[in-house]
Amino acid sequence: MIAIINYEAGNLASVSNALQRLTIPHTITNKESELDKADGIIFPGVGHATPAMASLRENGLDSWLKQTTKPVLGICLGMQLFYESSEEGDSEGLGVIPGRLKKFDSSQHKVPHMGWNTFSDVNAHPLVKGFGTEEYFYYVHSYYAPENEFTTASCHYINEFSSVVCRDNYMGVQFHPEKSGKEGSLLLQNFIQIVSSE
């Protein structure tokens, strides 16, 4: 069973629909007791980092996320909240991945980065099994995670940034797999495979 975390910044319906299409049993919840029963966690997100973190704290989900050993997939803002902090509202994140989110330079190109883009570099990890630099994924974001030792796949828009990050049981994608067609479905299936092999 997969649990999708329900908080005020979650893009819940499209993630749930994507799992339904793959016939993956799942629940949408903000209760720790239900998260504890799940085999894997999807942590979606759209919107602004500061109210998103406030919503997580309200239900104690920030502490739960920092302590869990279950596989967690962060999507878009969910991935960004794995980091220590963001220039967006000077907000703090969960801090499970080191680094600070930066804003794209709008003097160089349109911000947000919106539309389809490919990986510019990919490192081996079960989450990105079967992917190279040809597949397109759908992005919508104004802030980006600089590359670091936990960058699994990079993407280029204005500059290189982390498109996929993995550290221990935490995996994050900057794009929206639930809106990325068959490539996005394959990535979600890769995550389910990781969960089932735990």
Image: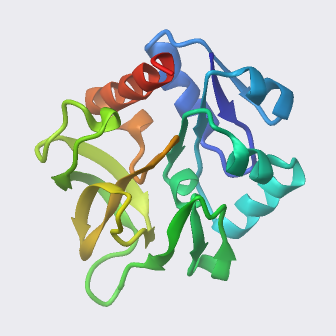
Please state the total of marks drawn on the protein image. Answer: 0
Q: Quadrant of residue 53?
A: bottom right
- Measured from the top left, where is residue 115 in percent x and y? 30, 54
Q: Residue at x 49, y 45 (%)?
A: 168
Question: In the image as oriented, which residue stretches furthest toward the left?
Answer: 134
**Nearest the camera: 188 or 21?**
188
Q: Residue at x 71, y 27 (%)?
A: 28
- Measured from the top left, where is residue 39 in percent x and y? 62, 21
Tell me the quadrant of the picture where the N terminus can be found. top right
- Measured from the top left, where is residue 24 in percent x and y? 52, 13
Q: How is the image coloured?
A: rainbow
Q: Residue at x 26, y 86 (%)?
A: 108
Is residue 192 left or right of 9 when viewed as pictured?
left
**Nearest the camera: 20 or 159?**
159
Is residue 124 left or right of 11 when viewed as pictured?
left
Q: Quadrant of residue 132?
A: top left
- Measured from the top left, where is residue 44 in percent x and y? 58, 43
Decide: is 146 above or below 69.
Answer: below
Is residue 107 left or right of 42 when viewed as pictured?
left
Q: Residue at x 52, y 15 (%)?
A: 20
